[in-house]
Image (cartoon, rainbow, N blue to C red):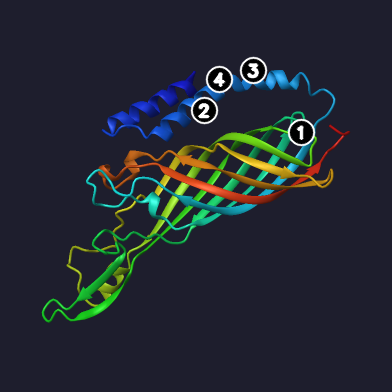
């Protein structure tokens, strides 16, 4: 019952922030709550038909992701952090247990990495660009860009339902839940250049980051995929889906800029089969 209380807490958390819950987030949370309720019954049912065969496989996949979401915070001016990361890479590895021809479960771990962030407002101002001027002559002494990178490592479980078991081309749908450790690396180059030029005030003793820097939270990943199996030993995989990571309000510097991580992803990979006793 604790897991159900956690989902209810998430809805309360959205309301306490004073913003109406995002429609996609609300649908996914409700769907995942129902999924967790019926999962044990589904596994008991399918295991009753899997007495004749079990097969394990190793899954490796590589691809990319792109974040999306509201462009600005509640002040409708300051940009939110997550939607403006540039496309990054997504790499996953997992161990899949095929319950029978139609149902599988996989434990996996993966990373997502984006090496840059970009936001230019309606006045053509780049939010990471800075310019340092001489306080007397106003001569430009230095200019450049601050840097913001994104890194996430996750581990979780995914369940799959295959549509055309036994066929060479076998589409499937999947849904999963995971735990995420998220970090954002911000380089305050403005501060370092100002220090070299002697422009810092005496009380400005260290760089400052206005962004979320770390978070540990639950995530959800529904999606679709297709496998092509030229033989029994391996299959080629193409997967596409949606990634939601719940971010904690206390990890944000500004409560008006709280948000969650939303991204779409596309990956290609390969599945190696082993520990096979007989054909499914």
- Whether residues under marks 1 and 2 lie with C-beta atoms below 8 angstroms apart, the answer is no
Real-space Cα separation, disc 2 to disc 3, in angstroms: 15 Å
Q: Earlier in the sequence, mark 1 or mark 4?
A: 4
Per the rendering, the mark at residue 165 is 1
Real-space Cα separation, disc 2 to disc 4, in angstroms: 9 Å
Secondary structure under badge 1? loop
Neighbour tally class for label 4: few under 14, some 14-19, many 20 plus, Cα within 10 Å = few
- Whether residues under marks 2 and 3 lie with C-beta atoms below 8 angstroms apart, the answer is no
Please determine whether, in this image, residue 116 is positioned above or below residue 169. Answer: below
Q: Is residue 231 left or right of residue 201?
A: right
Q: Quadrant of the C terminus?
A: top right
The picture places residue 130, in percent across and down from the top left corner, at: 27, 69
Give the residue number, with chain letter if any, for mark 2.
32
Give the residue number, with chain letter if any, for mark 4.
37
Real-space Cα separation, disc 1 to disc 4, in angstroms: 25 Å
Please name the residue shown 33% across and 49% down the image: 71
Per the rendering, the mark at residue 41 is 3
Please determine whether, in this image, residue 61 is positioned above or below residue 277. Answer: below
Q: Earlier in the sequence, mark 2 or mark 4?
A: 2
Relative depth, front residue between 82 and 228 = 228
């Amino acid at each position: 019952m604790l897991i159900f209380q956690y989902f209810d807490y998430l809805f309360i958390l959205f309301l306490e922030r004073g913003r109406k819950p995002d429609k996609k987030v609300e649908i996914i949370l409700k769907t995942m709550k129902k999924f967790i309720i019926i999962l044990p019954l589904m596994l008991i049912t399918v295991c009753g038909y899997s007495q004749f065969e079990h097969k394990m496989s190793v899954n490796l996949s590589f691809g990319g992701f792109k974040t999306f979401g509201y462009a600005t915070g509640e002040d409708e001016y300051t940009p939110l952090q997550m939607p403006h990361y540039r496309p990054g890479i997504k790499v996953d590895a997992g161990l899949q247990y095929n319950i029978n021809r139609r149902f599988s479960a996989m434990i996996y771990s993966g990373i997502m990495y984006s090496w840059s962030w970009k936001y230019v407002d309606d006045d053509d101002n780049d939010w990471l660009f800075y310019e340092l001027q001489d306080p007397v002559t106003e001569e430009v002494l230095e200019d450049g860009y601050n840097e913001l990178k994104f890194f996430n490592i996750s581990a979780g479980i995914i369940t799959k339902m295959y549509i055309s078991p036994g066929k060479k081309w076998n589409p499937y749908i999947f849904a999963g839940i995971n735990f995420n450790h998220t970090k954002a690396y911000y380089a305050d180059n403005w501060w370092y250049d100002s220090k070299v030029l002697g422009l810092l005030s005496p009380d400005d003793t260290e760089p400052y980051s206005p962004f979320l820097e770390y978070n540990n939270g639950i995530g959800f990943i529904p999606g679709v995929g297709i496998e092509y199996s030229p033989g029994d030993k391996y299959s080629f995989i193409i997967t596409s889906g949606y990634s939601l990571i719940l971010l904690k309000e206390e990890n944000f510097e500004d409560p008006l800029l709280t948000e969650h991580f939303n991204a779409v992803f596309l990956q290609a990979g390969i599945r190696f089969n082993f520990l096979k006793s007989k054909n499914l």
